[in-house]
Amino acid sequence: MLRSLSRVSELPIIVKQLQKNAASAGVAKTNNYATEATIQVNRPFKLHRLEEGPATEVKLTKDEALKYYTQMQTIRRLETAAGNLYKEKIIRGFCHLYSGQEACAVGMKAAMRDVDNIISAYRVHGWTYLMGVSPAGVLAELTGVQGGCARGKGGSMHMYSPNFYGGNGIVGAQVPLGTGVGLACKYKGNGGMCLALYGDGAANQGQVFEAYNMAYLWKLPVIFVCENNNYGMGTSSERASCNTDYYTRGDALPGIWVDGMDVLAVRSATEFAINYVNTVGPLVMETNTYRYSGHSMSDPGTSYRTREEIQEVRQKRDPITSFKELCIELGLITADEVKAIDLKVRKEVDEATAFAKSDAELGVSHLWTDVYSNNLEPKLRGTIGFDLDHIQERKGVNH
């Protein structure tokens, strides 16, 4: 089932090409240490209804290399910690891990500007961290304690921060919501746009196509991002979709296919897409990626694919390992710097885990606060058998 991710026979070729690209890349050095490199993206972009696409030759500075590696490694560690907390029954309910898909989020975030927004489904622990919430704030929300970014009320699927609209539990529902965020950007004239993320499983939802249509007619600044990890729950994309070229499914909307395991390719594609949606109209972007874990913690992830398939991707296509090796070969990062980052990330996530385990839950009286963003009535409506005053303790982050 690696057809759309990469054929098994192609994997060694891709690795060799990575090494070839690194060797031939232009490198600027200071005191024998690289400060900037020019790199060719690993796999070519595929285009739909576009005359030209994203830049295939990208620049990477030392600071950027350190930042992207740190971010991807932090997300990986966060998800490992979340998985362990779930197995300990400290995290309850739904829990969907992002391990393997880190390059998608980090690449998109690298291209975003202060006026840009993002909305996604329920695999969002990593995005929450990238949008400004500390690892402690993420893990505490997962364990349902008051130190969480939503005070423990939201849990795994409902986290928010400025310009980040969640975390949405209804499959595909975030796509029309993201279209609305794009409409708000156009209405305000602030030059911003919205990334509306969904998976290959949600790509068959009718509301996705309705959102495409409205966005196209109104020329809204929205990038519809299909994070294609090749499996919708336990069903492969080939068994679920008559057209697995998700970047073409916007019909009149142009589209881009990008290797979602290459953080620099994702960054380049997102930069192109941001410019396009702000000058022309909406666009569909497919990031072809892979999740190592099951769909959720209740899914072992091996009943519909083999362990060998998962291991092969880990060994030959892992986004963090590939990026690390490229940066070391180019001289942008040293092995000692990698070790220092790994130790720092481990310490931060370990401390966040301890906090998430020890912090207290909100008191019962806080459970019905902040029901409305702008309360127009003194009492909560629709309660049966209770007479509750509306209490506002803090304002919503995106109001």
Image (cartoon, rainbow, N blue to C red):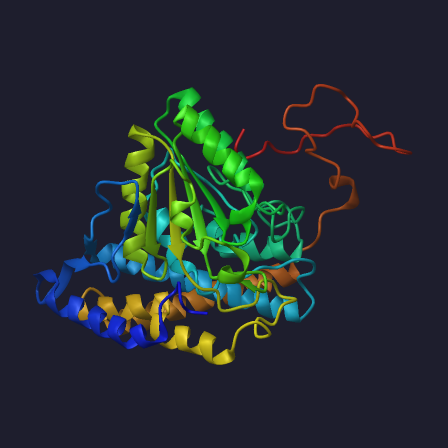
Which residue appears farthest toward the bottom when viewing the image? 308
Pick the front one: 16 or 324: 16
Does residue 210 appear in the picture of this structure?
A: yes
Q: Position of residue 227 (x, y in %)?
A: 45, 53
**Residue displayed at 47% across by 62% down:** 230
Answer above or below: position of 222 versus 40.
Answer: above
Which residue appears farthest toward the front when viewing the image? 242
* Residue 72 appears left or right of 371: left
* Residue 277 appears left or right of 298: left
Answer above or below: position of 243 versus 290.
Answer: above
Q: Position of residue 375 (x, y in %)?
A: 69, 23
Does residue 165 appear in the picture of this structure?
A: no
Pick the front one: 351 or 43: 43
Q: Position of residue 339 (x, y in %)?
A: 33, 73
* Residue 304 appears left or right of 13: right
Which of the 4 quarters of the picture holds residue 391? top right
Number of numbered discs on residues = 0
Which of the 4 quarters of the picture holds residue 15? bottom left
* Residue 76 appears left or right of 66: right
Q: Position of residue 216 (x, y in %)?
A: 41, 30
Identify the image quadrant of the C terminus.
Answer: top right
Answer above or below: position of 375 versus 304.
Answer: above
**Residue displayed at 46% across by 25% down:** 184
